[in-house]
Image (cartoon, grey):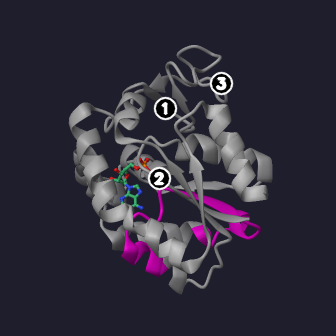
């Protein structure tokens, strides 16, 4: 299964990708998580990407395309993967096509902007493994620690009201056109993401498995 998760920031891509990754035994590749890791480790890519991520802007295409090419060549991706947060622009989608990898399904999780804003302000992330939670909709069973690795949960630096607005604007102008792009290719599947976490998972499984 080679899957792309589409949808606005906060639509639930990361959370649902985590669930699908466990279900299908394939890795989730999150360009956002890779970039945040690079920033934390102060690598040259991380230092360069920090200014963009802090403002809620997209990191340049050539940088993320380089990251994804390297990651997809690793052995754990050979039997499938879930892309969370890539592609985010048409040139990124074209770069993925040019790698000659056949994508089985592109899953668009639909959530209205007003709900996105509420969701992102309650989102928490594990400071170590990147697992995501929400204070009301998906709290960690371990309180303010991660259920998976017991590390502290933090609020992402880019989940603040101003940056959220800019990320949503960029989503509509640069990422949303990908819905039409993949509809034309014939592998788009749409799932409603406004209900509970479980209802969204059910909707996703239905469109993926019929
Ligand atoms: P995410 O964790 O997917 O919400 O991504 C967080 C931030 O990382 C985004 O706001 C961008 O600054 C950057 N980023 C992640 N994926 C991409 C991508 N495919 N293209 C450009 N920037 C990205």
Is there CB contact under 8 Å for labels 2 and 1? no
Segment tinted magenta in the rendering: 72-95
Q: Residue 19's image quarter?
A: top right
Q: Earlier in the sequence, mark 3 or mark 2?
A: 2
Q: Earlier in the sequence, mark 2 or mark 1?
A: 2
Residue picked out by circle 1:
127
Q: Position of residue 74 (x, y in %)?
A: 65, 68
Question: Along the line of sight, which residue is nearer the eye, 152 or 85?
Answer: 85
Q: Residues within 10 Å of mark 1 (few under 14, many from 20)?
A: some
Q: Position of residue 130 (x, y in %)?
A: 53, 39
For image coordinates 39% across by 37% down, the residue present is: 116
Q: Position of residue 75 (x, y in %)?
A: 71, 68
Question: Along the line of sight, which residue is nearer the eye, 170 or 109?
Answer: 109
- Vertical comparison of 143 with 39: above or below: above
For image coordinates 57% across by 36% down, the residue present is: 131
For image coordinates 39% across by 74% down, the residue present is: 90
Q: Position of residue 58 (x, y in %)?
A: 30, 58
Residue picked out by circle 2:
7
Mark 3: C-beta under 8 Å from nearest atom of ligand 1: no
């Amino acid at each position: 299964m080679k899957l792309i998760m589409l949808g606005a920031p906060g639509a639930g891509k990361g959370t649902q990708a985590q669930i699908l990754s466990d279900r299908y035994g394939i890795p989730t590749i999150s360009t956002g998580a890779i970039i945040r890791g690079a920033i934390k480790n102060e690598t040259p890519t991380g230092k360069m990407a920090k200014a963009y991520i802090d403002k809620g802007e997209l990191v340049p295409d050539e940088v993320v395309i380089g990251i994804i090419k390297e990651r997809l060549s690793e052995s754990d991706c050979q039997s499938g993967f879930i892309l969370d947060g890539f592609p985010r622009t048409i040139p990124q989608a074209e770069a993925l096509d040019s790698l000659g990898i056949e994508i089985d399904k592109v899953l668009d999780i639909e959530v209205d902007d007003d709900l996105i804003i509420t969701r992102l302000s309650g989102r928490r992330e594990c400071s170590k493994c990147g697992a995501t939670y929400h204070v009301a909709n998906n709290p960690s069973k371990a309180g303010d620690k991660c259920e998976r690795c017991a590390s502290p949960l933090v609020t992402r630096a880019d989940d603040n009201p101003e940056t959220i607005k800019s990320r949503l604007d960029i989503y509509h102008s640069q990422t949303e056109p990908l819905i039409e792009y993949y509809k034309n290719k014939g592998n788009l599947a749409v799932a409603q993401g406004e209900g509970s976490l479980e209802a969204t998972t059910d909707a996703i499984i239905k469109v993926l498995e019929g």
